[in-house]
Amino acid sequence: MQKISIQNVEKFLFLGDTNFFGYIKLLYESSGILNTITITSVSLIIVLLLIEIALRIIKDSPINLLVSIYKTIRMRWFVYKINNDTLEQNKFTIYNNVVSHCTVNVQNQSIIVSLRLPANVDSVKLYKQAEPIIFEEIVNNNPNYYFSSPMRVGRWMQIIGSKR
C-alpha cells in the first residue's frame, strides 16, 4: 500500500494546483486507503451476517431471517407517509426518518415489531394517529400470532406476538 504524501495534498488543496494530472496522482495515491476501507467494511458485514445466520441455525430457523427481512421491508413501506403540503413537510420528514428504523424479528414461537418513536411533538402526534392502523396491519399480516398491546420501551414502541 502506498502512502499519500502530505505535500501533494497541500499542494492540491491549498496552493490551488488545478492540474488535472496532479488530481489524478492524488486519487491514485489515495486509492490504496479506499480499497483497504472497502475490504474492511465488506469483511465486517460478512462476519456479522455469518454470526446472525449461525445463531439462527442454532436457536431458530434460517428461513425466519429471510421472513424477518421481508416483513421489515413491507412494514417500512406501510408506515412511510407521503405529504405534498409544504407547510407541514418538516414534521413528515422527521416522522419518516424515525419510523424507517422499524424492525420485524420473526422467530419460531414469537414475533417482535419495533418502531422507533420520534422526538418531535408534531411527529409523535402523527405516530399516535397512525398507531391503531399500524397495529391492525401487523395483526392482519400475521394471523398465526396473538399480539400484545403496544409497549413503550425507551424511545421504541414494541409489539410482541406469540404463536397460537
Image (cartoon, rainbow, N blue to C red):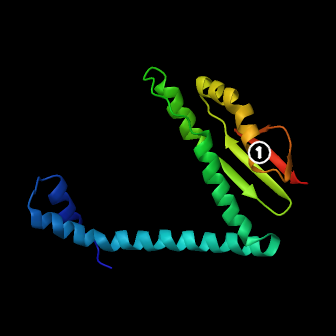
The residue lying toward the viewer, choosing from 12 and 47, is 47
Amino acid type of the residue that numbered disc 1 sits on in the rendered structure: Asn
The residue lying toward the viewer, choosing from 140 and 3, is 140
Q: Which residue is mark 1?
A: 140
Q: Which residue shows up at 79% across the image and 54% down it?
A: 111
The residue lying toward the viewer, choosing from 79 and 14, is 79
| Figure quadrant of the C terminus | bottom right
Q: Which residue shows up at 30% across the image and 71% down it?
A: 31
- 138 relative position to 26: left or right: right
Q: Is residue 161 visible?
A: yes
Above or below 9: residue 61: below
Above or below 148: residue 120: above
Q: Which residue shows up at 21% across the image and 66% down it?
A: 26
- 23 relative position to 1: left or right: left
Q: Which residue shows up at 8% across the image and 61% down it?
A: 19
Q: Quadrant of residue 120?
A: top right
| Figure quadrant of the N terminus | bottom left
Q: Quadrant of residue 148?
A: top right
Label 1 crowd (10 A; few <14 / some 14-19 / many >=20): few
Q: Secondary structure at mark 1?
A: helix
Residue at the top extreme of this rendering? 87
- Residue 131 image position (x, y, % from top left): 71, 32
Q: Is residue 154 visible?
A: no
- Residue 15 image position (x, y, % from top left): 12, 53
